[in-house]
Amino acid sequence: MKKLFVTCAVFAFTCSCTETDEMQYVKKLGGKWASEENENSRFFEEWDVLAEGNLIGKGFLLTDGVDTTVSEELKIEKIKNEIFYVATVKNENDNKPVKFLLVENDSQHLVFENKLHDFPQRIKYFFLNDRELKVVVEGEYKGQNESNEMLLSKW
């Protein structure tokens, strides 16, 4: 009986550590990120880590240092035992959210995937260091493989 208790306790501890570790890497996105200025505009992504561990964010474009256009409302949430990146992009998909499942997750990168979405099918975050990350959106579009990437710095 004692051996069974110890085994159960170790299993429960291992499961709770795994759950924390999954969101631990996702939480590295927390904060404000900005691209370099390009033709008088910069792209920003902001992520807030909520008390329950989920993230809420937005992506927006700042033009001429004044005009802000919010292009997407974002969240990353754990639903049951899966983690989803949920994007609601203005004037796309009837303004309905699109979910991408977290399929790769470690200290160096995150990969979210939705094979049924028109474009992108994958959203990747590569943690280059504590202050920089690379975002890659990729997939097939009109029969061609497409890939766009952007370097963001912590703001």
Image (cartoon, helix red, strand yellow):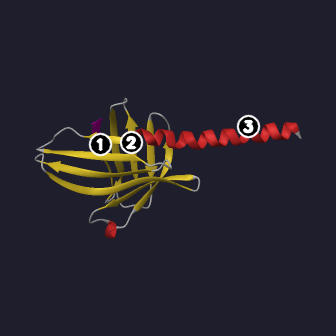
Q: Nearer the viewer, residue 73 or 94?
A: 73
Q: Which residue is mark 3?
A: 10
Name the amino acid type tagged 2: Gly
Give the label on residue 136, or none: none
- Position of residue 96 relative to residue 151, above or below, is below
Q: Position of residue 12 (x, y in %)?
A: 70, 42
Q: Quadrant of residue 13?
A: top right
Whichever of callouts 1 and 2 sits on the residue coming sooner in the sequence is 2
In this view, which residue lies farthest toward the front?
51
Q: Which residue is mark 1?
A: 149
Give the main secondary structure, helix, strand or loop, of the magenta stretch.
strand
Q: Position of residue 42 (x, y in %)?
A: 19, 44
- The magenta segment is 148-155
Q: Quadrant of the N terminus?
A: top right
Q: Which residue is mark 2?
A: 30
Alpha carbons under labels 1 and 3: distance apart = 42 Å
Alpha carbons under labels 3 and 2: distance apart = 31 Å
Count residues near mark 2 (Cα–Cα under 10 Å), then give few for <14, some for 14-19, many for 20+.
some
Q: Quadrant of residue 38?
A: top left
Q: Is residue 154 magenta?
A: yes
Q: Nearer the viewer, residue 40 or 28?
A: 28
